[in-house]
Amino acid sequence: MSAALRDFMPVAARARAACPRLTTLGEVVGLPLLAARIGAGEPAGLLMAGTHGDEPATVEAALQVLERPAGGWTGGLSLDVLPCTNPTGYVQDARETVQGVDINWSWSRHDVAEIEMLRRFLLGRRYRFVIDFHEDWETPGFYLYEHRLGVAAAGPRMITAVERVCRINRDAEIEGWPACNGVVTADSSRERITRGDGFPLVLLRDHTAHKLTTETPTELPMQLRVQAHHAALDALLAHYAELT
Ligand SMILES: [Zn+2]
């Protein structure tokens, strides 16, 4: 691997300090793929970040979630947290892994260490929801993808919460998909045909009935992007806390 642009040590140190129950799913070029758990009992949801290594606000947002003081902010819900699923991409500030793989769209491959670790981690796990933090270089405002199978929508409520932090992308079409007030509801079958066996679709098929992907504009200051992800997450947790 060429010279690192970012140091992964502070990420691992902060996660470890914040979360005594931190585990390592494995290592890629000496960098750990970390898994944490917040709260007690069976986790209701999974929070993922850092799947694309050039989206650093997602990792920062996940670390700050781990660093929040315990005390009910999750509405009593327990969460699994994968704060950086692509550590080699993170240190290189690259979308892909050191192997040149986009984790999100290479799920059918069996020669990618990160994907194998995630596959083993997810085996037999089901969540009420999965939220995946991402960033977008091109968008002028925040938006999110919402895929759901027979469960109530949370996307519009999440947009209302993020609106207080930053601008929303209200285009009628985002990334080629129809969108309404910042919520993209891409059709799974069309997406599968166009993009291959994607991780978002595998999660929806095997591990949850409710998949959300938040996208912050990279042009905003880091802390605003972090706040936008948090506003979306907190609105989603409030939605599920009310259903419990
Ligand atoms: Zn991304």
Image (cartoon, rainbow, N blue to C red):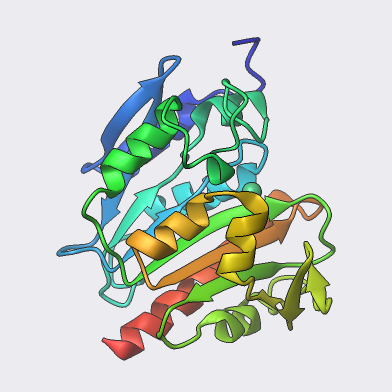
Instruction: Indicate the quadrant where residue 16 lies.
Output: top left
Q: Is residue 10 left or right of residue 52?
A: left
Please give the name of the residue rendered at 39% of the width and 51% of the height, measured from the top-left corner: 67
Instruction: Indicate the quadrant where residue 126 lies.
Output: bottom left
Q: Position of residue 5 (x, y in %)?
A: 67, 21
Q: Position of residue 107 (x, y in %)?
A: 48, 42
Q: Is residue 105 above or below residue 152?
A: above
Pick the residue in front: 102 or 46: 102
Q: Position of residue 86 (x, y in %)?
A: 51, 34
Pick the residue in front: 234 or 73: 234
In the rendered image, the residue lying farthest to the front is 193
Q: Is residue 140 visible?
A: yes
Instruction: Indicate the quadrant where residue 167 lies.
Output: bottom right
Q: Is residue 231 visible?
A: no
Q: Is residue 148 left or right of residue 17?
A: right
Q: Position of residue 97 (x, y in %)?
A: 57, 28
Q: Looking at the figure, which quarter contains the C terminus?
A: bottom left
Pick the residue in front: 180 or 13: 180
Pick the residue in front: 213 or 102: 102
